[in-house]
Amino acid sequence: MLEDGRVVFDRFDYHRGAVESENEAFFLRILKPGEFRYEGADLGILVTRGRSMTKSYQLNERAKKWIHGIKSSFSAKPLPTARALSEPAFKVL
């Protein structure tokens, strides 16, 4: 994470132990491009050093910056709207 809160890709690594400081994180992407995104869906797993919550179990400012930075790297298109049929879609014999 840069000083202004932006999150940028720095290097590839396959092990979460490579995180060296609180300004680095390991992100394992779960949601693939083109997959359906819904409320509560996991975009990925973020592993950081240091604490992400306060003693009262609220996210701290650093955690909020990580979340905002990662979410801003994702984009989505709205689903097409459903349209009603003018005639019934079935027949009764």
Image: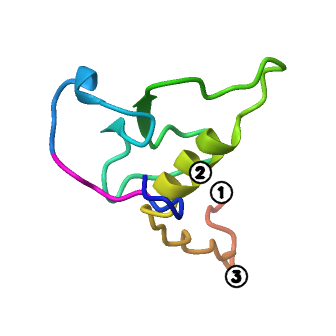
The image shows a total of numbered marks equal to 3
Q: Nearer the viewer, mark 3 or mark 2?
A: 2
Q: Earlier in the sequence, mark 3 or mark 2?
A: 2
Lateral position of residue 75 relative to residue 61, left or right: left
Lateral position of residue 35 relative to residue 52, left or right: left
Q: Earlier in the sequence, mark 3 or mark 1?
A: 3
- Tag of residue 73: none
State which quarter of the image contains the C terminus.
Answer: bottom right
Residue 88 rendering spot, x and y as whole percentages: 69, 69
Residue matched to label 1: 93
Q: Nearer the viewer, mark 1 or mark 2?
A: 2
Residue beneath the point at 53% across and 47% down: 66
What sort of colour scheme is used for the picture? rainbow
Q: Is residue 10 magenta?
A: yes
Residue beneath the point at 68% across and 57% down: 92
Residue beneath the point at 44% across and 26% down: 49
- To which quarter of the image does residue 90 belong? bottom right
Residue matched to label 3: 86
Q: Report the magenta residues as a range.
A: 7-11
Q: Say what amino acid the circle numbered 2 marks.
A: Lys
Q: Is residue 93 magenta?
A: no
